[in-house]
Amino acid sequence: MKTKTLDQKTGSRIRIACEAAGMIQERLAELINVKPQHLSDIERGKKGTSVASVRRICTELHITSDYILFGRTEDDHPLLVERVKTFNKSEESLSQRAINFAFETYHLGATGVKRDIPDWTDTSDSSPE
């Protein structure tokens, strides 16, 4: 029995994430600035990929590099998941705002596009859109 190489495992996870996101290979290739054939080779494990490409793939598919490189998912963090389950409404609201703030800040840094970033420290009942 032949074991899969790291490139094959990585490529397979990229393909799975692309399908889960409802994105066709050609569109992802365009978004990450590679030729569709090159992305196909990566997905089949025929070629490796650069850190920059992994980062772009993660950004476009809204997944983590932990998933692409190691197959780890949010289920791999049971203590965090259990803690979040105990949040009251106020903690839940504040944590959602903090997460939104982090995503918006990351997006601003990655794209250079200025966006309105909500004040996640505001404890009023209004939720950011």
Image (tube, rainbow, N blue to C red):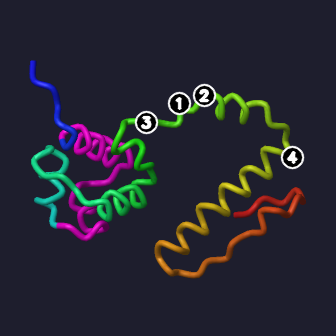
**Circle 1 crowding by C-alpha within 10 Å: few under 14, some 14–19, many from 20:** few
* Rendered view: 11 above or below 123: above
- Kindly identify which numbered label has been placed on residue 40: none
Which image quadrant: the C terminus? bottom right
Which residues fall within the magenta stretch?
8-34
Q: Residue 124, located in which quarter of the rendered image?
A: bottom right
The disc, 2 or 4, on the residue closer to the chain's N-terminal end is 2
Secondary element under disc 3, as helix, strand or loop, is loop
Q: CA distance from mark 3 to mark 2?
A: 12 Å
Q: Residue 80, located in which quarter of the rendered image?
A: top right
Q: Report the amino acid beneath label 2.
A: Pro
Q: CA distance from mark 1 to mark 3?
A: 8 Å
- Please name the residue that numbered disc 1 is placed on: 75
* Rendered view: 124 above or below 116: above
- Kindly identify which numbered label has been placed on residue 90: 4
**Circle 2 crowding by C-alpha within 10 Å: few under 14, some 14–19, many from 20:** few
